[in-house]
Image (spheres, coloured by chain):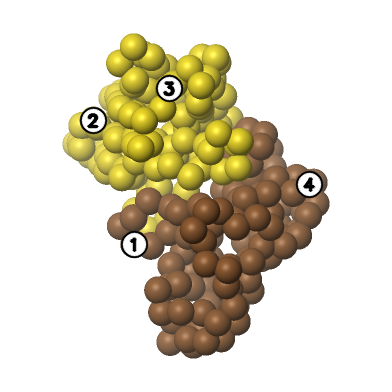
Chain colours: A brown, B yellow
Amino acid sequence: NIVMTQSPKSMSISVGDRVTMNCKASQNVYNNIAWYQQKPGKSPKLLIYYASNRYTGVPDRFTGSGSGTDFTLTINSVQAEDAAFYYCQRIYNSPFTFGSGTKLEIK
Amino acid sequence: QVQLKESGPGLVQPSQTLSLTCTVSGFSLTSNSVSWVRQPPGKGLEWMGAIWSGGSTDYNSALKSRLSISRDTSKSQVFLKMNSLQTEDTAIYFCTRLTTEGRGFAYWGQGTLVTVSS
């Protein structure tokens, strides 16, 4: 089974800063990656699909990149409302494995 | 619009079977798949399994021996049954749907908390 490894586990960033978080697949998943944002007590929200495509309504400060085994989610000019957990997920083929998540805190 | 809503018992005793229902609206189960995802308190997301538009199923290999997903298309309902529950199965259980083009899980229920305890 494919394992998705996210890093770092947590990060603390100031408003306006740029943040980058990583997702590594244990084998080639091509561009079949999605990124989600989850706030406490809420369901996950789809941000990025097929590695680099923003889902409907997602602000353009969220950018996804990568292919093969290494993927990155970048948030430019972080806002206070971006404080959340972020998860990557293999899509297109099951099992739809999630990464363990990155917690983003705003200073 | 697309909606999913989970329902079921909030408390299950150890070794018993969990039964959950996901009631959907705004789309047809014969044209879309539904997955179950769970999240233990304070932990990450785990994809459990899916039932596809044609009725076939896929399961997380770690849960396959205990898990069954089925549906009633006439009632727009998807069912999860998992047996031999243990305390580590305590979690919020979500049902979720892929976008039509399979771009990711864009539609989620609110989740239902299941506690395994005697």
CB under 8 Å between callouts 1 and 3?
A: no
Label 2 marks which chain's residue? B
Q: Which SS class for mark 4? A: loop
Identify the amino acid type marked 1.
Answer: Pro
Tell me the crowding category of disc 2: few under 14, some 14 to 19, or many 20 or more residues within 10 angstroms, Cα based.
some
In the picture of the structure, the residue carrying the numbered disc 4 is A30
Tags 1 and 2 touching, CB below 8 Å: no
In three-dimensional space, the C-alpha distance between marks 3 and 4, rounded to whole angstroms, equals: 30 Å
Return the x and y of residue B17 as percentages of the image width and height. 31, 23
- Res. B112 image quadrant: top left
Distance from Cα at disc 2 to Cα at disc 3? 22 Å
Quadrant in which residue A7 is drawn? bottom right
N-term-proximal mark, 4 vs 1: 4
Question: SS class of the residue under badge 3?
Answer: loop
Q: Residue at x 55, y 34 (%)?
A: B100
Task: Report whether mark 2 lies on the same chain as mark 3.
Answer: yes
Type of the residue with mark 3: Ser
Of B24 and B95, which appears nearest the observer? B24
Q: Which residue is mark 2?
A: B8
Q: Identify the secondary structure beneath mark 1.
A: loop
Corner quadrant of residue B85:
top left
Do the residues under discs 4 and 2 have CB atoms within 8 angstroms?
no
Which marked residue is nearer to the observer: mark 2 or mark 3?
3
| Drawn side of residue B63 relative to residue B18, left or right | right
Nearest to viewer (mark 3 / mark 4): 3
Above or below, B22 relative to A9: above
In the drawing, what numbered circle is on residue A40? 1
Question: Looking at the rendered structure, which numbered label has been put on residue B28?
Answer: 3
Between the C-alphas of marks 1 and 3, the distance is: 30 Å
Question: Disc 4 sits on a residue from what chain?
Answer: A
